[in-house]
Structures are given as structure tokens and as C-alpha cells.
Amino acid sequence: MEKILVIGAGGQLGTELTRALVNTYGTNAVIATDLQEQVKSKFDYCTFKILNILNKEATASLIKEEKITQVYHLAAMLSANGEKNPILAWDINMSGLLNVLELAREFKLNKIFWPSSIAVFGPDSPKKNTPQNAFKNPTTVYGISKLAGEHWCEYYFNKYGVDVRSLRYPGLIGYKSMAGGGTTDYAVDIFFKAVKEEKYTCFLKADTYLPMMFMDDAVNATLKLMVAPSTNIKIRSSYNLSGMSFSPQEIFECIKLHIPNFTIKYEPDFRQKIAETWPSSINDACAERDWGWKAQFDISKMTSEILTKLPLYIN
Ligand code: AKB
């Protein structure tokens, strides 16, 4: 039986991925962990423990005691927060991953999942339909750490046979948890504001196109990647993954179809510069070829889904 450790379970992706893992593998097969005690209430349906991934000994003990076979290592500092504290971001993102990879090797774990990001691309990468192997010159410490992390994953696979799998997520949009510290966060915040206040101040310019993905697609892609036969996983750095692309103005207009009084104004801040270095759309042909990936949600389907479910969720 697989026993799955989720590290950083209280974050935006972890909140929904942990639930999906429990639905797939059963309550007793999943241990949710996070640094923050306050997220504990999210996990009344499975075991929850406090874990700091920078504490390698504590992580090793947990893996041993709980007979862990798979790790989903989601804990990271995202792009915008990373620029405020680059050294800490590097430490969390890199030391955390290296601890997990070393423990995977030591304990011969079956599988590891680690998220990468579209932030691995940079100003000199092709903007549109960015290919898997495009030139990469990330300018944020987050992007640099993700690109280095991808190389480490590939290294541990080639050198030690660690079955580590990864996805380059676009901006993830869900309604069950707030995003935190990223550049694509506006696309989550805007829905919460639309439902509560009917006005939103956007920190990116109106016409900034970025790759985005609805959380259900992100969770499905992750589960699909992780159950694919090892021989199908031809890319051991990280797979490009695509859902949809839109600008703040486009998502605003889509929401306005449902909430006609909704208003927006634009006050771009330092995150605009980050966004301008990233692709506007992603080519994920390798994911489709190797493990049959296809996104289900476009901008209007996602908007209807969120605006139907979010009011019920926050009340
Ligand atoms: C961020 O904005 O930093 C993240 C990402 C694209 O990886 N959402």
C-alpha cells in the first residue's frame, strides 16, 4: 500500500491536492504536513502534522515512522515574496527540495512529486506557445530556484534512479484557498473581490497576458502524471503544462457577464515587471504525448464554476 506524505499541504495547491489524494488513496494513506499550525483545521479528514522541511532529521523520522512511500513536496516561496527576501526564498526552495531528494534516495521512496513553474522562463524565452525546451533565463529568485530544482530532479533520476516527476504550473486559480505571494495571484483575488465587494484594484496592467489554469485541471494533471507508468515519463526535469491564457481585462469582462456592477482599476506595482518576463502562453505537447494530458477548463467555464461555487464556499 502507498503511504503519501504531503509537505506544504496548507498552501493553495496543497489544500486541494491533499483532498484529491485522500479521495483516491484513502484517509489512512495520506499524511498532510505544514509549517503553519493554523492550517490544521483544513485537515479534519486525514492525519495532520507540523513539519519544517528544512529540518531534514524530523522529515527523516516522519518518513521512517509512517513508512512513507511517496512524497508530494509543495512547500515553496513564490515569485513576488521571493523578490522581497531572495536569500530566504533560495534556502526554502532549494534546501527543501534537496532534503526531499536525498531522503528519497536514502529511503528508496517509490515516487516524488515536485512543482516547477512557468517562472523558469525569462525575457529571452519565446513569449507565445513557449516550447518545452525553450531557452530559459529566469530573472526572479523563484524562477532561478525552480530551474535549478528541475536540474536537480533530473540529476537524481539519472544518477540514483529516484522516480521524481514535475510540472511547470501556470498561475493556479481556485476558490478553496487564497493564493499567497505570487505574481499570478490577482486572478484568484479578483474572484473573491467580485463576490464580496464588486470593485477590484489590479496590480498588473490590463493587457498582461499570462498562462493560467483552473485548480481542478492542476489537480487532475498532477494525479495523472503520478500514476503514469515510469517508462512514459520521458521528461525528468519538468513538463510544460497549459490550461488557458488571459489578461486582467479579459477575466474582468468575463466576471462582469455574471456580476454587471463589478468594477476594476489598474495600479501596477513591482509584480508587473516579473509578469513581463514570463510567457503569455505555453506549449504542452510533450505532456499530451507522454501521459495524455488535456485541460478541461477554459476562461468562461472556469468563471462560471467559480462564481457558482465561491459564494457557497465563503458563507
Ligand atoms: C507565481 O505567480 O509566483 C506562481 C507561479 C506562476 O509559479 N503562481
Image: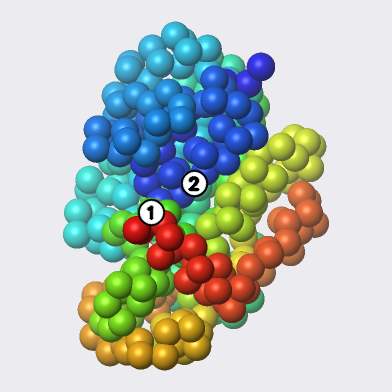
Residue 269 shows which numbered tag?
none
**Quadrant of the image occupied by residue 180:** bottom left
Q: Is residue 227 visible?
A: yes
Looking at the rendered structure, the secondary structure element under dot 2 is helix
Residue 272: image location, x then y, percent = 32, 79
Position of residue 258 measured from the top left corner of the image (x, y, whole percent): 48, 83
**Label 1 CB sits under 8 Å from any ligand 1 atom:** no
Circle 2 residue: 16
Few, some or many residues within 10 Å of mark 2 (<14, 14–19, 20+): many
SS at mark 1 in the image: loop
Q: Earlier in the sequence, mark 2 or mark 1?
A: 2
Q: Residue at x 35, y 90 (%)?
A: 261
Residue at coordinates 31% horizontally, 88% vertically from top-left?
264
- Placement of the C terminus among the 4 image quadrants: bottom left
The residue shown at (40%, 16%) is 62
- Mark 2 in CB contact with mark 1 (< 8 angstroms): yes
Which color mode does the image show?
Answer: rainbow
The mark found on residue 177 in the picture is 1
Given the image, on which type of amino acid does mark 2 rest?
Answer: Glu
Q: Classify mark 1: residues with Cα within 10 Å, few (<14), some (14-19) or many (20+).
A: some
User: Quarter holding the N terminus?
Assistant: top right
- In which quarter of the view is residue 21 placed? top right
